[in-house]
Image: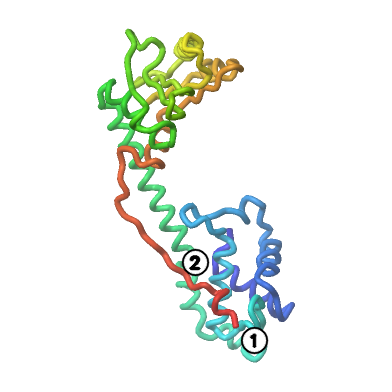
Amino acid sequence: MPNVKEIKRELLRLLKLKKKITPQEAYEELRRVFNLSDEEYNRRYKNSGERIFTNRVRFARQHLKEDGLLYSPRQGIWALNEDESNDDKQKGGTDTYDINLQEDGDIVFSIESLSEEYNNKLKLELKHVLSNVSWDFFEKLVVDLLNNMGYGNTANSIAFRMGSDGGVDGEIYLDHLGLEKVYVQAKKWTNNVGSDVVNNFLGALDIKGANKGVIVTTSDFTDSARKAVQDATTKTVALINGDKLVDLMMKFKLGVYEKKTFTIYDVDQDYFNE
């Protein structure tokens, strides 16, 4: 992925060649110049969803405008300011500015990278906390998570035990009358969950006349367990391992809270195009 300084140089070269260009033409031409793949071109910031490459092109465009090398004769058009686009002007006073230019263009990426690093450490801490909760609390946690995800609600979903689990630890009502249910099996294990657990759960679903279920574990599932689910063509069973569990807990804000939110603003260049 090219940085803002590299894009600025190529955008100026493109403007010298074409004199005037639309933003979309600039994006496509610069994509070709830098030989970006579809994956690279469509890579986006996680929080804002904005395409990283086009964001950097807009930064480059803004700084060329501030250097007096680019202007907008009308909305949606970027044009070369030929009076200012000589080599002396291009070289004069831009080196120090370009050092900061890359930092500005990559600041969102840097913040998101730091946030991702922090959250990865938090996931490890969350897995450690899960390893120390009681069995009963873990079963309740699983039902609470499914509630937060939109399956049932706290008024009509319950966590329960049947003998030695009875193959089922909880149920979620998908409607207010309880006509359709999702059954839950929770395994607070350090060892991976095998096909025997999956087959017992499938048998429990048969007894209850159900065809939907979720198995959640703090560890992982063996290949044979995953295959048992794939082979159960008349049943739909979701497998949630420890990594997926903490991802969902963070996404649906169970057992975590939002510590700090940052808002980063940018100038809406389309609004100021005259």
- Residue 115 place in picture, x, y as percent: 39, 51
Q: Position of residue 95 (x, y in %)?
A: 50, 78
What is the residue that sits farthest to the right in this orientation? Answer: 18
Judge from the rendering whether residue 51 lies leftward or rightward of residue 260; answer left or right. Answer: right
Quadrant showing the N terminus = bottom right
Label 1 with label 2: CB-CB less than 8 Å: no
Q: Vertical placement of 4 versus 224: above or below?
A: below
Amino acid at circle 2 = Gly
Looking at the picture, the colour scheme in use is: rainbow
Q: Which mark is residue 81?
A: 1
Residue 169 in view (yes/no): yes
Q: Quadrant of residue 52?
A: bottom right
Q: How many marks are shown on the rendered structure?
A: 2
Residue beneath disc 2: 105
Residue at the far front: name it: 177
How packed is label 2: few (under 14 Cα within 10 Å), some, or many (20 or more)? many
